[in-house]
Amino acid sequence: MLNQKVQEAINAQIKKEEFSSRLYLSMAIWCETNGYPGAAAFLYKHTEEERMHMMKFVRYVNSRGGSAVVSDIEKPEDKFSSLNDIFTKILVHEEFITTSINNLYGVTMDEKDYTTGNFLQWFITEQLEEENLMRTILDKISLVGLDKAGMFHIDKELEGMATATKSAPMA
Ligand code: OFO
């Protein structure tokens, strides 16, 4: 049976993963309606990845004899000013998620639930990859500044990343 404190902490994380999915959906919609189809494709894909993270937690809780919870979710913001604005916010959000996963790992260690701690390793690695990826994209966006041709190129690169099997860091 899953430890009660661990179950509560994972259920809180499930809510955050669902929020991430909805935040990236909101950002994808902005990109698609503001001339960035590549960034939209990238973010639509990321929306699905976040939902997959949520489902991974849901299935884990249930498989350990616990019960996953679907929570109320606040509406994500939908007003953005640029791609730079969006990827800056994504990076801040992913850093927040990394802290949250680390805290969750801390709960499993406090409760001596090493099985869940082991399960969380995948998420710890995933956060590292996601933060690196978003930081690389943001660096590129900052580099081109307001240059339209540069921004068009970045949008194309994001489109390529969306069609790749797994989001890989930009060269
Ligand atoms: Fe973006 O990794 Fe889950 O939240």
Image: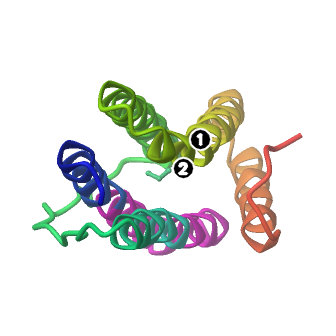
Q: Quadrant of the N terminus?
A: bottom left
Residue 75, position in %: x, y? Answer: 16, 63
Residue 116 can be seen in this image: yes
- Could you say which is closer to the camera, residue 111 or residue 96? 111
Q: Label 1 sits on what residue type? A: Gln
Q: Determine the residue positioned at 14% across, 67% down.
A: 71
Image quadrant assignment for residue 2: bottom left
Is 1 on the left or on the right of 112, as rendered?
left
Disc 2 residue crowd, few under 14, some 14–19, many 20+, Cα 10 Å: some
Q: Locate residue 146, reporting x and y percent.
A: 60, 38
Q: Which residue is mark 1?
A: 121
- Looking at this view, is 3 or 9 the one in front? 3
Image quarter of the C terminus: top right
Q: Is residue 34 visible?
A: no
The quarter of the picture where residue 25 lies is bottom left
In percent of width and height, residue 89 lies at 40, 39
Q: Which residues are magenta?
A: 18-46
Residue 47 rendering spot, x and y as whole percentages: 48, 68
Asked if labels 2 and 1 touch by Cβ distance under 8 angstroms, the answer is yes
Inter-mark Cα distance, 1 to 2: 6 Å
